[in-house]
Image (tube, rainbow, N blue to C red):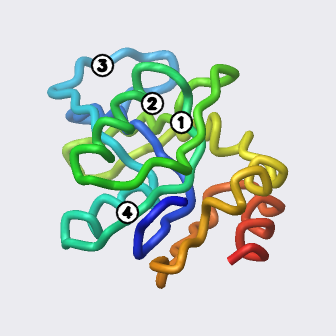
Amino acid sequence: MSEYSALFFGAAVMDLITYTERFPEPGETVSGKEFRKGTGGKASNACVMSAKLGLNAGMLAKIGDDLFGRELLDNYKKYNINIDNVLLTKDVFTATAAISVADSGQNTIIYIPGPTNTLMPDEISSIEANLFNDNCKLFVPTFECLPQTLHRVLTIA
């Protein structure tokens, strides 16, 4: 059984961030100033921040068995986050957010949920015995997944 005092449930996302003077008009290409890549997703970010603050955290999510998915797993391992309940799939790529930030501070985001929207209630049921241990005192679900999947996890909790 997985051991953690807090379990976070939701999306694990790779953020692809570009910085530009202004947004392009439809059909136009503009040169950007900078590119950054980072891990994201509301639940994932909360999990990492709680681990940085000393909480013994675990993550429940579904990610792609791909380069971005491996980077997310490496990030969890870096902060000693329990990943026993991070499910992998070869069917779709890890969730991404293509974020553009203009000098004005405005941003645009195109979010591709990928595996987050393929996590089904039966997959949650298959790992039910592993989700909530005696040490788990805090469960932090986000509304980043399918409603029926969230309902299944909340029923187990």
Q: What whole-number distance in Å separates the C-alpha atoms at marks 2 and 4?
A: 16 Å
Q: Secondary structure at mark 4?
A: helix
The residue at 53%/36% (across/down) is 95
Name the image quarter holding residue 99: top left
Q: Secondary structure at mark 3?
A: loop
The residue under label 1 is: 95
Give the residue type that dot 4 points to.
Cys
Residue 47: give its label: 4
Q: Picture coordinates of residue 55 (x, y %)?
A: 28, 73
Front position among marks 1 and 4: 4
Q: Picture coordinates of residue 53 (x, y %)?
A: 19, 72
The residue under label 2 is: 69
Relative to the observer, which residue lies in front, 56 or 70?
Answer: 56
Q: Are marks 1 and 3 in contact (CB under 8 Å)?
A: no
Q: Picture coordinates of residue 79 (x, y %)?
A: 23, 53
Give the residue type that dot 2 points to.
Gly
The residue at 48%/77% (across/down) is 136
Q: Quadrant of the C terminus?
A: bottom right
The residue at 64%/37% (across/down) is 115
**Mark 3 Cα within 10 Å, few/some/many (few <14, many 20+)?**
few
Front position among marks 2 and 3: 2
Lower position in the chain sequence, tag 2 or tag 3: 3
